[in-house]
Image (cartoon, grey):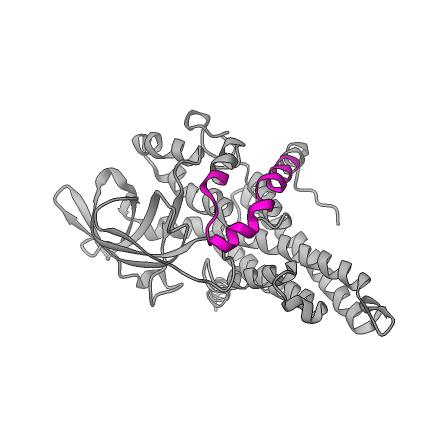
Amino acid sequence: MRRSIFEAEHDQFREMVRAFLIKEAVPHSEAWETAGIVDRDFWKAAASQGLVGFAASEAHGGAGQADFRFNVVLDEEVVRTGTVGDGFSLTNDIVLPYFLELSDEEQADRWIPGIVDGSSAIAIAMSEPGTGSDLRAMTTTARRDGDSWLLTGAKTFITNGLQADLVIVCARIPDSDGGGFGLFVVEGGQDGFERGRKLEKIGRKAQDTAELFFHDVRVADANVLGEPGKGLRYMMANLSQERLSMAITAVASAEHALSIALEYSKERKAFGQAIGSFQANRFTLAELSTKVQIARVYLDHCVRSHCAGELSAADAAGAKFWTTELEFEALDTCLQLHGGYGYIEEYEVARRWRDCRVQRIYGGTNEIMREIVGRSLGL
């Protein structure tokens, strides 16, 4: 189906992004997978091409381009070129909005130029051991101490945790009215800030994921984002875009899986004929193709709604759980059609299959997403 959400400038941007990734990322992906981390030099090169923080103002080195469709193009090309690592979606879609929307003038001048030029990697620390998707249950605390805050607690599953120069830490403020939450920016090298082990994951091996520990880390008022006590409200406001970003990745991934499956089904022979010619496989691929096209139309509508400021939390949650479930179905079907070869690491489908599994977990598990949608129905 022909898409209608993009204009000529988005198509030109897509060509530039694809050329850059093919040249600068694809040849290094295997090495990054082995090392368990994406090289910072690549990140700086991407920033020099204007692919990092382009929503920031021109005064801070960005392009002042808040059109989320550019984020969509970049996220899709990362998937289609097989680029490993989550740096683009994490930075542009998930973490940067906190800095852009909540920083005061002094904070923006201090932090945003470094983010845009690639010299400052960023992360957000929400998840904790034992809490998972239940943000209200977090136990990391920030207590007032004189003219600053003392941050104590532990976070886990933190994407970019090992490399981040700036970490937005979500913490409970026990002394606030109603036990609110705050967002505290911790800088690498601060006393009491300790990075734990690099977590060895089933998939997404090139993306560093870590445990973080905070032992009475002193955070000045100048490093508090927004108003203390309103942190949960800020997180809820930004989670819709985070979940939409995951849906964008999921649909692009499902489309790519379908293309791999179709190509392989035409080439692979069994019992003297192409495996795609068997009715069972043909019907499976026909159904999958239809589902993927439905997902594309559905998601593009969500993108339009988001650009218009009309995407609700429930709509974003629905998009996240439905598309990531489809993504896994598409890749699992693709792997099955490959037979034993699908389980061999040298085949592209093997990596994509294991990489996609976490999509149904992070950003809020799909069970939580269904709960959000269910409550929106008055149930």
Q: Which residues are magenta?
A: 15-42
Residue at the (71%, 67%) spot, across then down: 338
Percent x, y for residue 47? 49, 34
Left/right of residue 234 with respect to residue 219 in the rendered view: right
Quick one: 262 or 5, which is closer to the camera?
262
- Residue 212 occupies quadrant: bottom left
Residue 137 visible in rendering: yes
- Residue 189 occupies quadrant: top left
Residue at the (55%, 42%) spot, across then down: 71
Quick one: 123 or 296, which is closer to the camera?
123
Residue 304 visible in rendering: no
Percent x, y for residue 364? 45, 61
Residue at the (58%, 51%) spot, across then down: 248
Left/right of residue 271 with respect to residue 309 in the rendered view: right
In the rendered view, tell whether residue 44 sits above or below residue 76.
above
In the rendered view, tell whether residue 125 sits above or below residue 378.
above
Quick one: 376 or 50, which is closer to the camera?
50
Left/right of residue 187 with respect to residue 277 in the rendered view: left
Percent x, y for residue 31? 53, 50
Residue at the far left in the pictured view: 146
- The secondary structure making up most of the magenta span is helix
Q: Is residue 107 magenta?
A: no
Residue at the (63%, 34%) spot, across then down: 16
